[in-house]
Image (cartoon, rainbow, N blue to C red):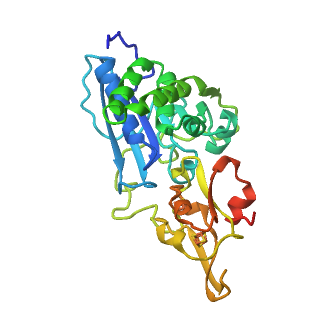
Amino acid sequence: METKVVEMKNVNEFGFYEIRMESIGGQGANLAGKVLGEAGVLNMGINGLNFSSYGSEKRGAPVKAFVRFAPAGKEIYVNSPVERPQLSAIFHEQLIKTVPVMAGVTPETVIIVNTARTPDEMRDVLKMNSGKIVCIDALKIAMEEGTRVNTALLGTIAKFSGFIDPEAVKASISHNLGKKYAKLVPPNLKTFDRGYNEGVLKEFADDGKYPPVDACGGVACQKIGYLNQPIGGVIPVAGTSIQKDLSPSREGWIPVLNKTNCKDCGECDITCPDMTFEWTDGTNALGKEGRVLVRINYQYCKGCLRCVQMCKFDALHAHKEAEVDEEILKKGFTRV
Ligand code: SF4
Ligand code: SF4
């Protein structure tokens, strides 16, 4: 690709433009960071690096992907995680409940959120004093195009960075997907274009609605010392079955349990990787004393739909999550 001179505005004190993607396993943030890094270095002629930080490599585990860009000629010797991003992309709004997504964010940071909400609504969710919010319904786009949210978000990131050439990113998407999955290239390029065009930006001034927080998201920005160093050997968010919330892993689809058809056979529970089905003792559907399926607890469901394939009794169906009644989501079953 022919490269042009790239003017990067809003760089940090070291001259870098830094991007942080907040995600969980399965949403493709790692690949998005790779695509973006390659687009900058190979197709735009600027310097860049990307890497990700994650624990266990599985759906539902928290993932952060980082991209650091610098103009051509300026070398990057910093490879630490991005703590004060110029652009922060939140791959699912539910992450706001469990991940400190506002850490290090300043009023100059562009915050992109995958959500069906408006920027005004999202400001209330984030309790943001002032700054820039871009809302993009990447999940809806991905469902309509048969793709994933990461390519839609790449389009939004390219647009609101102000300097990332969309054609450079599209060339990188084609290169990365085309090697193994050529058929996926056209829908992903369309997804990218929609992400580029459908993001809605709103800037908020400090109107006193929410108090300002320091750039560390409420954590003092001073250097770490004996008074404020984190306690070693402690996992602050324990991976207990009570706290974990897999709802951000879902890609728009959920299983709905129709209790009228359920025979309490337990096949769904055997196949479910996340202990989502709740049971009790009682008289089962065959009239015998035994275990009785109570409901699906959607907090733990990552939407893989294996259970739907497994059920032989037409008691589990896949539905678009956005179209399922709130009451069914709360109860965890229906009888129709
Ligand atoms: S597999 Fe189907 S019939 Fe069997 S317990 Fe699960 S939902 Fe009920
Ligand atoms: S879709 Fe079914 S199998 Fe997959 S996590 Fe949810 S309940 Fe379990």
Residue most extreme to the bottom: 289
Residue 118 image-quadrant placement: top right
Q: In the rendered view, tell whether residue 160 sits above or below residue 234.
A: above
Residue at 35% x, 10% y is 5
Q: Is residue 324 above or below residue 115?
A: below
Q: Position of residue 243 (x, y in %)?
A: 53, 64
Question: Residue 232: x and y, percent?
Answer: 34, 62
205 or 326, which lies in front? 326
From this view, report whether residue 224 is shown above or below residue 82: below
Q: Nearer the viewer, residue 251 or 135?
A: 251
Q: Quadrant of residue 293?
A: bottom right
Residue 135 is situated, as x and y percent measured from the top left of the image, at: 61, 33
What residue lies at 32% left-to-right and 11% top-to-bottom?
3
Can residue 14 be seen at all in this image of the molecule?
no
Q: Residue at x 62, y 27 (%)?
A: 200
Instruction: Work out which quarter of the rendered image holds the N terminus and state it.
Output: top left
Q: Position of residue 249 (x, y in %)?
A: 51, 51
